[in-house]
Amino acid sequence: MTRPVRQCLLIHILINNTYEEQKYIFLPRKKKAKPGTFRRITEVELVAEDSSYNVPAEYDTDDIYTSESSTQEDSPNDEDNDFSDNFENYSHPMFDIPDISDTPDISELPTDELIKGILIWIMKFRSSHNIPNTAIEELIQFIKIILKVCKNINYESFPNSLYMLRKKLGLFDQFTQFAACQKCHKLYKKEEIISKDNNTVMKCSHVEFPNSATKRLKQCRTPLGKKISLNNSISIVPELIYPVSSIQQQLSSMFKRPGFEELLRHWTRRSIIDNVLSDIYDGQIWKNLKESSEQGSNNFFRPDKADAHLGLMMNLDWFQPYEGTIYSTGVIYAVICNLPRDVRFKPENVLILGILPGPDEVKLHKVNHYLSPIITELESLWEGVNLNRTNECPNGKDI
């Protein structure tokens, strides 16, 4: 029994009748005293610009200090001040965004229509009934034996394995894989984890608290890989793998489907009821978001660009993939808000962005590590990309 937990991240669009600026007041973090240390709180004076707002007394301000540290805080050369603006580094390793013009080579497709039909049926059968790869491997070998005894059939072109079947149909997993730290979830290149001498396991060098007086020089030092025995030799493999899928390539495939672009334009023809908020299109963000910050810039969402300017809503869901054990896996995915609400969350219209490794749910602030490569590609999409072919535009289309 799966247990979905939805957390909306990164893009949260609120539908409101009014579009007003809000003022946020952030409370200082509580300071914890070290065990065995006597804290003497001297006179505290809380001053706020807005006299109508009072900071709760349970929160310590910079005027609250211990007698032991008062001399240090009065010093203008306080060492901690040098680190007050340092934040945790959530950057990801450099990687190449797949080129959407690199379409799979279909030159190896079988010319025999019967064999081609059998291969397509096997993949649909596997997907519909969630059949394990080992069972599909045996099915492929069994069908090849049957074809071998049949006459007038070129059984040699029939694949021997699932790998060869996927290759003949031009089906490839378009994932970029990163290695992740088990403790702090910092991302590394998968190739860096495998040591050249196969004896040294790389350790995480991430500093989780760079603005802490006691932890700013402390590295995580968690092993990023493990040694396994493979083919009578010792190999090092990453402890955790984080696969990221290309948004551009998924959009390229969607735009080749018949009727997809028409669905993207539906919101321009929908009926509107005054003072009724029925969908995201009634919100101020959808109505007023501009293409740029320049004066007089056009609205980003407008009828003439209804199937080219896309609004994505990102989500993170956790689920239990296995029965009889506690193991949580997360999926970061996005849906296209231009699509009608009744088809927006259908599997064929969902963009899989990344799969977070288990076995435990990642703390919310550490999800930033996994979001980092996704944000990089979203920034690339904001600049615009050209699809080499769509169902309605055989010569290409800019989105």
Image (cartoon, rainbow, N blue to C red):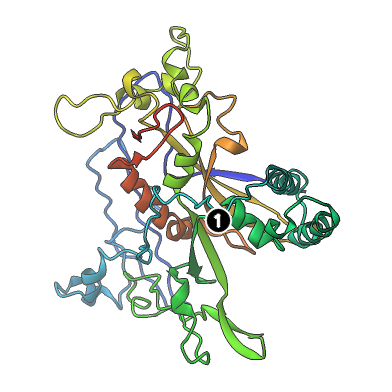
Work out whether residue 71 or residue 16 is closer to the camera in this orientation and state it. Answer: 16
Q: Residue at x 49, y 21 (%)?
A: 279
Give the residue number, with chain letter if any, for mark 1.
173
Q: Residues within 10 Å of mark 1 (few under 14, many from 20)?
A: few
Placement of 397 over or under 187, stated as above or below: above
Disc 1 is placed on an element classified as: loop
In the displayed orientation, state which residue is furthest to the front.
152
- Can residue 58 be seen from the camera position used here? no
Please name the residue shown 72% across and 54% down the image: 154
Image quadrant in which you'd find residue 304? top left
Where does residue 289 sit, x and y in percent of width and height?
30, 28
Tally of marks: 1
Kindly identify the residue that appears in the image at 47 percent across and 83 percent down: 202
Residue 152 pos. (x, y %):
78, 50
Closest to the observer: 309 or 20? 309
Please, is residue 145 above or below residue 22 in the view? below
Q: Position of residue 224 (x, y in %)?
A: 51, 78
Q: Is residue 20 left or right of residue 203?
A: left
Query: Height in image: 358 above or below 22?
Result: below
The quadrant in which the C terminus is found is top left
Q: Is residue 169 left or right of residue 136?
A: left
User: Observer-nearest residue: 219 or 60?
Assistant: 219
Q: Is residue 59 left or right of residue 227?
A: left
Give the residue type that dot 1 points to: Asp
> Observer-nearest residue: 348 or 373?
348
Examine the rendering and report whether any part of residue 188 can be seen. Answer: yes
